[in-house]
Protein backbone atom coordinates (compact mmCIF):
# COMPACT_ATOMS: atom_id res chain seq x y z
CA UNK A 1 0.00 0.00 0.00
CA UNK A 2 1.33 3.46 -0.88
CA UNK A 3 1.11 6.42 1.47
CA UNK A 4 -1.25 9.37 1.03
CA UNK A 5 1.25 11.24 -1.08
CA UNK A 6 4.60 10.16 -2.48
CA UNK A 7 7.27 9.73 -5.02
CA UNK A 8 8.29 6.95 -7.37
CA UNK A 9 11.29 5.16 -8.89
CA UNK A 10 13.51 2.13 -9.63
CA UNK A 11 17.18 2.34 -10.68
CA UNK A 12 19.28 3.67 -13.49
CA UNK A 13 22.99 4.39 -13.43
CA UNK A 14 24.48 6.49 -16.18
CA UNK A 15 28.10 6.91 -17.27
CA UNK A 16 30.32 9.55 -15.76
CA UNK A 17 31.23 12.61 -17.77
CA UNK A 18 33.13 15.65 -16.57
CA UNK A 19 32.01 18.95 -18.09
CA UNK A 20 32.58 22.60 -17.41
CA UNK A 21 29.76 24.89 -16.32
CA UNK A 22 29.28 28.39 -17.63
CA UNK A 23 31.49 29.96 -14.95
CA UNK A 24 34.40 27.56 -15.57
CA UNK A 25 33.92 25.31 -12.54
CA UNK A 26 33.69 21.55 -12.92
CA UNK A 27 30.33 19.89 -13.25
CA UNK A 28 30.10 16.95 -10.81
CA UNK A 29 30.20 13.41 -12.18
CA UNK A 30 27.04 11.34 -12.10
CA UNK A 31 25.74 10.32 -8.68
CA UNK A 32 27.10 7.24 -6.90
CA UNK A 33 23.53 5.94 -6.72
CA UNK A 34 20.34 6.69 -8.61
CA UNK A 35 18.10 8.93 -6.54
CA UNK A 36 14.83 10.82 -7.07
CA UNK A 37 13.05 13.52 -5.12
CA UNK A 38 16.52 14.51 -3.94
CA UNK A 39 17.18 18.06 -2.74
CA UNK A 40 20.16 19.70 -4.41
CA UNK A 41 22.14 22.88 -3.77
CA UNK A 42 25.42 24.51 -4.70
CA UNK A 43 27.22 26.88 -2.33
CA UNK A 44 30.17 29.21 -2.90
CA UNK A 45 32.18 30.41 0.09
CA UNK A 46 35.66 31.94 0.19
CA UNK A 47 36.32 30.68 -3.33
CA UNK A 48 35.31 27.12 -2.48
CA UNK A 49 32.47 25.57 -4.50
CA UNK A 50 30.55 22.70 -2.93
CA UNK A 51 27.61 20.73 -4.29
CA UNK A 52 25.20 18.70 -2.15
CA UNK A 53 22.48 16.18 -2.91
CA UNK A 54 20.98 13.13 -1.26
CA UNK A 55 17.95 12.05 0.79
CA UNK A 56 14.88 11.27 -1.35
CA UNK A 57 14.07 7.70 -2.29
CA UNK A 58 16.09 4.84 -3.75
CA UNK A 59 15.15 1.82 -5.83
CA UNK A 60 12.35 -0.35 -4.52
CA UNK A 61 9.72 2.39 -4.34
CA UNK A 62 8.54 1.57 -0.81
CA UNK A 63 8.72 3.52 2.40
CA UNK A 64 11.73 1.40 3.35
CA UNK A 65 13.61 2.95 0.46
CA UNK A 66 13.50 6.47 1.89
CA UNK A 67 17.05 7.71 2.41
CA UNK A 68 18.76 10.09 4.82
CA UNK A 69 22.26 9.84 3.37
CA UNK A 70 23.89 12.18 0.89
CA UNK A 71 27.04 13.30 -0.85
CA UNK A 72 29.10 16.41 -1.38
CA UNK A 73 31.34 17.33 -4.27
CA UNK A 74 34.12 19.94 -4.33
CA UNK A 75 35.41 21.37 -7.58
CA UNK A 76 38.92 20.22 -6.72
CA UNK A 77 37.92 16.60 -6.05
CA UNK A 78 37.45 13.69 -8.42
CA UNK A 79 34.10 12.41 -7.19
CA UNK A 80 31.21 12.62 -4.76
CA UNK A 81 32.08 12.07 -1.10
CA UNK A 82 29.54 10.48 1.32
CA UNK A 83 28.46 12.46 4.38
CA UNK A 84 26.65 11.41 7.57
CA UNK A 85 22.91 10.81 7.44
CA UNK A 86 20.49 13.57 8.33
CA UNK A 87 19.32 13.00 11.94
CA UNK A 88 16.09 10.98 12.28
CA UNK A 89 12.78 12.57 13.19
CA UNK A 90 10.91 10.84 16.00
CA UNK A 91 12.91 7.70 15.35
CA UNK A 92 12.23 7.64 11.60
CA UNK A 93 15.04 8.10 9.08
CA UNK A 94 14.83 9.27 5.51
CA UNK A 95 13.15 12.28 3.98
CA UNK A 96 10.87 12.98 1.06
CA UNK A 97 9.78 16.44 -0.03
CA UNK A 98 12.70 18.29 1.57
CA UNK A 99 14.64 21.23 0.14
CA UNK A 100 18.27 22.27 -0.01
CA UNK A 101 19.46 25.87 -0.32
CA UNK A 102 22.67 27.85 0.09
CA UNK A 103 22.47 30.48 2.84
CA UNK A 104 25.47 32.64 3.68
CA UNK A 105 27.82 30.16 2.02
CA UNK A 106 26.46 27.08 3.80
CA UNK A 107 24.20 24.25 2.62
CA UNK A 108 20.92 24.01 4.53
CA UNK A 109 18.34 21.21 4.32
CA UNK A 110 14.75 22.17 5.11
CA UNK A 111 11.86 20.03 6.25
CA UNK A 112 10.62 17.05 4.32
CA UNK A 113 8.48 14.25 5.64
CA UNK A 114 8.82 10.72 6.99
CA UNK A 115 6.65 7.65 6.40
CA UNK A 116 6.08 5.12 9.19
CA UNK A 117 5.42 1.38 8.87
CA UNK A 118 1.67 2.05 9.06
CA UNK A 119 2.14 4.61 6.23
CA UNK A 120 1.48 7.54 8.54
CA UNK A 121 3.28 10.66 7.30
CA UNK A 122 4.79 13.44 9.40
CA UNK A 123 6.07 16.76 8.15
CA UNK A 124 9.42 17.44 9.79
CA UNK A 125 10.04 20.92 11.25
CA UNK A 126 13.84 21.09 11.39
CA UNK A 127 16.29 23.11 9.33
CA UNK A 128 19.80 21.64 9.35
CA UNK A 129 23.09 23.24 8.35
CA UNK A 130 25.77 21.07 6.80
CA UNK A 131 29.05 21.78 8.60
CA UNK A 132 32.18 20.62 6.78
CA UNK A 133 34.85 21.17 9.46
CA UNK A 134 36.47 19.47 11.22
CA UNK A 135 34.35 16.61 9.79
CA UNK A 136 31.09 16.76 7.83
CA UNK A 137 28.03 16.79 10.07
CA UNK A 138 24.58 18.29 10.58
CA UNK A 139 23.59 21.03 13.03
CA UNK A 140 19.96 21.89 13.61
CA UNK A 141 19.71 25.68 13.33
CA UNK A 142 15.97 26.36 13.24
CA UNK A 143 12.47 24.93 13.72
CA UNK A 144 9.69 25.95 11.36
CA UNK A 145 6.68 27.50 13.10
CA UNK A 146 4.50 25.35 10.79
CA UNK A 147 6.39 22.35 9.38
CA UNK A 148 5.99 22.05 5.62
CA UNK A 149 7.23 19.68 2.96
CA UNK A 150 6.92 19.70 -0.81
CA UNK A 151 6.84 23.51 -0.61
CA UNK A 152 8.88 26.06 -2.57
CA UNK A 153 12.04 27.28 -0.81
CA UNK A 154 13.65 30.50 -2.04
CA UNK A 155 16.56 32.58 -0.74
CA UNK A 156 16.64 36.38 -0.83
CA UNK A 157 19.80 38.38 -0.20
CA UNK A 158 21.76 35.26 0.85
CA UNK A 159 20.03 35.67 4.22
CA UNK A 160 16.25 35.27 4.10
CA UNK A 161 14.54 31.91 3.48
CA UNK A 162 11.02 32.02 2.02
CA UNK A 163 8.84 28.90 2.29
CA UNK A 164 5.77 29.19 0.08
CA UNK A 165 2.66 27.03 0.68
CA UNK A 166 3.28 23.25 0.83
CA UNK A 167 1.92 20.28 2.75
CA UNK A 168 1.79 20.21 6.57
CA UNK A 169 0.90 16.84 8.13
CA UNK A 170 -2.75 16.66 7.03
CA UNK A 171 -3.17 19.17 4.21
CA UNK A 172 -1.86 22.15 2.29
CA UNK A 173 -1.27 25.55 3.89
CA UNK A 174 -1.38 29.05 2.38
CA UNK A 175 1.49 30.37 4.48
CA UNK A 176 4.60 32.23 3.34
CA UNK A 177 7.03 31.66 6.22
CA UNK A 178 10.24 33.71 6.27
CA UNK A 179 13.33 32.85 8.32
CA UNK A 180 16.07 35.40 8.88
CA UNK A 181 19.20 33.24 9.07
CA UNK A 182 21.11 36.13 10.64
CA UNK A 183 19.03 36.58 13.80
CA UNK A 184 17.06 33.33 13.67
CA UNK A 185 13.66 35.06 13.77
CA UNK A 186 10.63 33.75 11.85
CA UNK A 187 8.03 36.08 10.39
CA UNK A 188 4.94 35.57 8.29
CA UNK A 189 4.87 37.29 4.91
CA UNK A 190 1.81 38.04 2.78
CA UNK A 191 -0.05 34.70 2.49
CA UNK A 192 -0.08 32.63 -0.68
CA UNK A 193 -3.15 33.93 -2.60
CA UNK A 194 -3.90 30.88 -4.72
CA UNK A 195 -5.27 27.48 -3.85
CA UNK A 196 -2.77 25.97 -1.38
CA UNK A 197 -0.61 23.38 -3.12
CA UNK A 198 2.21 20.88 -2.76
CA UNK A 199 4.70 19.83 -5.43
CA UNK A 200 4.70 23.29 -7.00
CA UNK A 201 7.86 25.04 -8.21
CA UNK A 202 9.26 28.53 -8.62
CA UNK A 203 12.17 30.90 -8.57
CA UNK A 204 13.23 34.38 -7.51
CA UNK A 205 15.16 37.17 -9.26
CA UNK A 206 15.80 40.32 -7.25
CA UNK A 207 12.60 41.07 -5.36
CA UNK A 208 10.26 39.17 -7.72
CA UNK A 209 9.22 35.54 -7.46
CA UNK A 210 7.10 33.32 -9.72
CA UNK A 211 5.36 30.23 -8.35
CA UNK A 212 3.38 27.73 -10.45
CA UNK A 213 1.30 24.57 -10.43
CA UNK A 214 1.56 21.64 -8.00
CA UNK A 215 -1.33 19.65 -6.50
CA UNK A 216 -4.33 21.17 -4.78
CA UNK A 217 -6.94 19.35 -2.69
CA UNK A 218 -10.58 18.70 -3.57
CA UNK A 219 -13.14 17.47 -1.07
CA UNK A 220 -16.01 15.80 -2.97
CA UNK A 221 -19.39 15.34 -1.33
CA UNK A 222 -18.78 11.60 -1.33
CA UNK A 223 -15.61 9.54 -1.38
CA UNK A 224 -12.00 10.29 -0.57
CA UNK A 225 -10.39 13.65 -1.17
CA UNK A 226 -8.61 14.15 -4.47
CA UNK A 227 -5.31 15.76 -5.48
CA UNK A 228 -5.78 17.31 -8.94
CA UNK A 229 -3.13 19.45 -10.60
CA UNK A 230 -3.28 23.23 -10.26
CA UNK A 231 -2.85 25.47 -13.30
CA UNK A 232 -2.37 28.60 -11.18
CA UNK A 233 0.73 30.79 -11.51
CA UNK A 234 1.42 33.86 -9.40
CA UNK A 235 3.95 36.69 -9.42
CA UNK A 236 4.94 38.08 -6.02
CA UNK A 237 6.83 41.35 -5.65
CA UNK A 238 8.50 42.29 -2.36
CA UNK A 239 7.95 45.89 -1.35
CA UNK A 240 11.10 47.99 -1.18
CA UNK A 241 10.32 49.12 2.37
CA UNK A 242 9.16 45.75 3.70
CA UNK A 243 10.34 42.37 2.36
CA UNK A 244 7.51 40.66 4.24
CA UNK A 245 4.86 42.47 2.21
CA UNK A 246 4.33 40.69 -1.09
CA UNK A 247 2.14 42.19 -3.76
CA UNK A 248 0.68 39.13 -5.51
CA UNK A 249 -0.53 39.18 -9.11
CA UNK A 250 -2.10 36.24 -11.01
CA UNK A 251 -0.31 35.18 -14.19
CA UNK A 252 -1.64 33.32 -17.22
CA UNK A 253 -1.17 29.54 -17.03
CA UNK A 254 2.28 28.39 -18.09
CA UNK A 255 2.71 27.03 -21.66
CA UNK A 256 2.13 23.31 -21.98
CA UNK A 257 -0.27 23.06 -19.07
CA UNK A 258 0.31 22.25 -15.38
CA UNK A 259 3.44 20.39 -14.32
CA UNK A 260 4.17 18.64 -11.04
CA UNK A 261 7.56 18.74 -9.33
CA UNK A 262 9.36 20.56 -12.12
CA UNK A 263 12.95 21.75 -11.73
CA UNK A 264 12.80 25.53 -11.38
CA UNK A 265 15.04 28.52 -10.65
CA UNK A 266 15.35 32.24 -11.25
CA UNK A 267 18.30 33.72 -13.15
CA UNK A 268 19.40 36.40 -15.57
CA UNK A 269 20.34 35.31 -19.08
CA UNK A 270 21.73 37.92 -21.48
CA UNK A 271 20.50 40.58 -19.11
CA UNK A 272 16.93 39.26 -19.02
CA UNK A 273 15.38 38.21 -15.71
CA UNK A 274 13.58 34.86 -16.01
CA UNK A 275 12.10 32.13 -13.85
CA UNK A 276 12.69 28.81 -15.63
CA UNK A 277 10.63 25.62 -15.32
CA UNK A 278 12.16 22.43 -16.77
CA UNK A 279 10.63 18.98 -16.98
CA UNK A 280 8.24 17.79 -14.30
CA UNK A 281 5.24 15.47 -14.68
CA UNK A 282 1.84 15.89 -16.28
CA UNK A 283 -0.05 14.97 -13.10
CA UNK A 284 0.46 14.61 -9.34
CA UNK A 285 1.57 11.11 -8.36
CA UNK A 286 2.47 8.86 -5.47
CA UNK A 287 5.99 7.64 -4.78
CA UNK A 288 5.57 4.69 -7.15
CA UNK A 289 5.05 7.14 -10.04
CA UNK A 290 1.36 6.29 -10.24
CA UNK A 291 -0.90 9.31 -10.53
CA UNK A 292 -3.46 9.88 -7.80
CA UNK A 293 -6.05 9.56 -10.56
CA UNK A 294 -4.87 6.01 -11.31
CA UNK A 295 -2.94 6.96 -14.46
CA UNK A 296 0.88 6.63 -14.46
CA UNK A 297 2.58 10.02 -14.48
CA UNK A 298 4.30 11.07 -17.69
CA UNK A 299 7.67 12.83 -17.46
CA UNK A 300 8.00 16.02 -19.53
CA UNK A 301 10.92 17.41 -21.49
CA UNK A 302 9.58 20.93 -22.04
CA UNK A 303 11.41 24.05 -20.83
CA UNK A 304 9.49 27.30 -20.36
CA UNK A 305 10.27 30.57 -18.62
CA UNK A 306 8.43 33.62 -17.41
CA UNK A 307 10.20 36.70 -18.73
CA UNK A 308 9.94 39.10 -15.81
CA UNK A 309 11.05 42.09 -17.87
CA UNK A 310 8.63 41.60 -20.77
CA UNK A 311 5.98 40.04 -18.50
CA UNK A 312 5.32 37.13 -20.85
CA UNK A 313 5.67 33.34 -20.94
CA UNK A 314 8.19 31.97 -23.44
CA UNK A 315 9.19 28.49 -24.63
CA UNK A 316 12.71 27.15 -25.15
CA UNK A 317 14.42 24.13 -26.66
CA UNK A 318 13.41 21.02 -24.68
CA UNK A 319 15.59 18.86 -22.46
CA UNK A 320 17.51 16.04 -24.13
CA UNK A 321 15.18 13.58 -22.37
CA UNK A 322 12.05 13.77 -20.18
CA UNK A 323 12.74 14.26 -16.49
CA UNK A 324 10.53 14.53 -13.37
CA UNK A 325 10.44 14.35 -9.56
CA UNK A 326 12.80 17.23 -8.88
CA UNK A 327 13.52 19.27 -5.78
CA UNK A 328 15.58 22.00 -7.44
CA UNK A 329 17.41 23.41 -10.44
CA UNK A 330 21.00 24.58 -9.90
CA UNK A 331 22.17 27.81 -11.56
CA UNK A 332 25.87 28.11 -12.41
CA UNK A 333 26.55 31.30 -14.30
CA UNK A 334 24.28 31.15 -17.35
CA UNK A 335 23.97 27.35 -17.19
CA UNK A 336 21.34 25.17 -15.53
CA UNK A 337 21.92 21.75 -13.93
CA UNK A 338 19.47 18.96 -13.09
CA UNK A 339 20.70 16.37 -10.58
CA UNK A 340 19.00 12.98 -10.41
CA UNK A 341 15.21 12.74 -10.55
CA UNK A 342 13.09 10.25 -12.48
CA UNK A 343 13.27 9.39 -16.16
CA UNK A 344 10.54 8.66 -18.70
CA UNK A 345 10.15 5.11 -17.34
CA UNK A 346 9.53 6.54 -13.84
CA UNK A 347 12.87 5.12 -12.74
CA UNK A 348 15.43 7.03 -10.69
CA UNK A 349 18.38 8.60 -12.42
CA UNK A 350 21.96 9.10 -11.32
CA UNK A 351 22.58 11.53 -14.18
CA UNK A 352 23.83 15.09 -13.96
CA UNK A 353 22.31 17.04 -16.87
CA UNK A 354 23.59 20.49 -17.80
CA UNK A 355 21.88 22.72 -20.33
CA UNK A 356 21.81 26.29 -21.48
CA UNK A 357 18.58 28.20 -21.96
CA UNK A 358 18.03 28.63 -25.69
CA UNK A 359 16.65 31.84 -27.16
CA UNK A 360 12.83 31.78 -27.11
CA UNK A 361 11.20 29.59 -29.75
CA UNK A 362 7.54 29.40 -30.81
CA UNK A 363 5.46 27.35 -28.40
CA UNK A 364 4.04 24.16 -29.88
CA UNK A 365 0.33 23.49 -30.44
CA UNK A 366 0.00 21.89 -27.00
CA UNK A 367 1.75 24.83 -25.42
Image: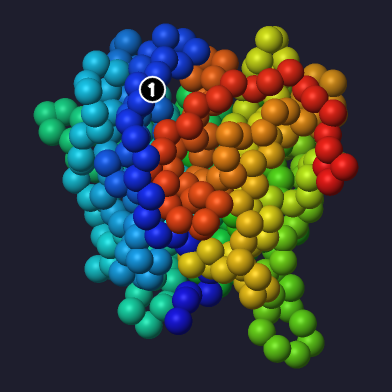
Q: Nearer the viewer, residue 322 or 89?
A: 322
Percent coordinates x, y for residue 181 in the rendering: 43, 33
- What residue is at 62 percent from the left and 28 percent from the top? 266
Drawn side of residue 303 relative to residue 159, left or right: right
In this rendering, the count of numbered labels is 1
Percent coordinates x, y for residue 310 in the rendering: 84, 21
Residue sitting farthest toward the left: 134
Percent coordinates x, y for residue 231 in the rendering: 78, 53
- What residue is at 31 percent from the left and 12 percent from the top? 46
Drawn side of residue 336 relative to residue 63, left or right: right
What crowding class fits label 1: few (fewer than 14 Cα within 10 Å), some (14-19), or many (20 or more)? many
Is residue 125 visible in this depiction of the protein?
no
Is residue 32 visible in this depiction of the protein?
yes
Drawn side of residue 245 relative to residue 327, left or right: right
Q: Nearer the viewer, residue 320 or 210?
A: 320
Q: Quadrant of residue 41?
A: top left
Tell me if residue 196 comes above or below residue 16 in the rendering. below
Which residue is tagged 1?
27
Screen quadrant of the C terminus:
top right
- What residue is at 26 percent from the left and 49 percent from the top? 69
Screen quadrant of the N terminus:
bottom left
Q: Secondary structure at mark 1?
A: loop
Tell me if residue 337 comes above or below residue 292 in the rendering. above
Q: Nearer the viewer, residue 364 or 63?
A: 364
Percent coordinates x, y for residue 113 in the rendering: 42, 61
Amino acid sequence: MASVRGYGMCSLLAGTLMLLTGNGSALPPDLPQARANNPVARAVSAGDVIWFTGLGIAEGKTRRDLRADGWVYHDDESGWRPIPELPPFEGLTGRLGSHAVALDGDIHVIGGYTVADDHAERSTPGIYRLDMAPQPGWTRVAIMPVPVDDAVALVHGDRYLYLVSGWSDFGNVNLVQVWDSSDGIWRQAEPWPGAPVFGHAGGLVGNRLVICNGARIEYPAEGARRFPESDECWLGTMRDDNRYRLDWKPLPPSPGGPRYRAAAAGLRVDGVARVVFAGGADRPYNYDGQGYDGVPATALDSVVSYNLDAEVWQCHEPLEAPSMDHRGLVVTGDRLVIVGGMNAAREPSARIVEFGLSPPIPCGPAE
